[in-house]
Amino acid sequence: MRHQAVDALWAALRGLPWAQREAVVLVDLQERPYQEAADIAGIALNTLRTRLHRARARLAERLADRQGDLG
């Protein structure tokens, strides 16, 4: 079951637009501080926060949809 959840997460992550995926990878997967992630991405801190917020919302939505498919 855990393997399916991990696969679903990676599939949902791959489905994000590049800018949102980059924000998630830098902050959530690589655990970089927000400002460092913004600097790496070459964007303002508030832009990073916006992208991260939207990406997390999309991921949650896609994973919830996937959960419905499994149940």
Image (cartoon, rainbow, N blue to C red):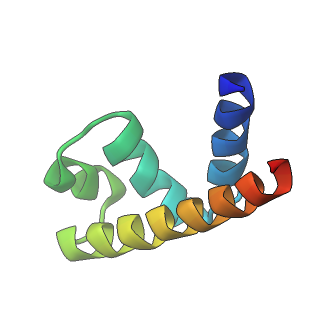
Q: Is residue 51 above or below residue 30?
A: below
In the rendered structure, the answer to whether residue 68 lies left or right of residue 41 reads right
Q: Is residue 52 above or below residue 33?
A: below
Q: Residue 35 in the image: x percent, y percent?
A: 15, 55
Q: Residue at left 35%, top 33%?
A: 30
Q: Residue 41 in the image: x percent, y percent?
A: 35, 56
Q: Residue 3 in the image: x percent, y percent?
A: 71, 24
| Count of marks overlaid on the render | 0
Figure quadrant of residue 61: bottom right
Figure quadrant of residue 9: top right
Q: Residue at left 19%, top 68%?
A: 45
Q: Residue at left 55%, top 61%?
A: 60
Nearest the eye: 41 or 53: 53
In the rendered structure, the answer to whether residue 33 lies left or right of residue 10 reads left
The quarter of the image holding the N terminus is top right
Q: Is residue 60 above or below residue 40?
A: below
Nearest the eye: 62 or 1: 1
Q: Residue at left 28%, top 69%?
A: 49
Which residue appears farthest toward the front when viewing the image? 71
In the rendered structure, the answer to whether residue 39 lies left or right of residue 71 reads left
Nearest the eye: 49 or 43: 49
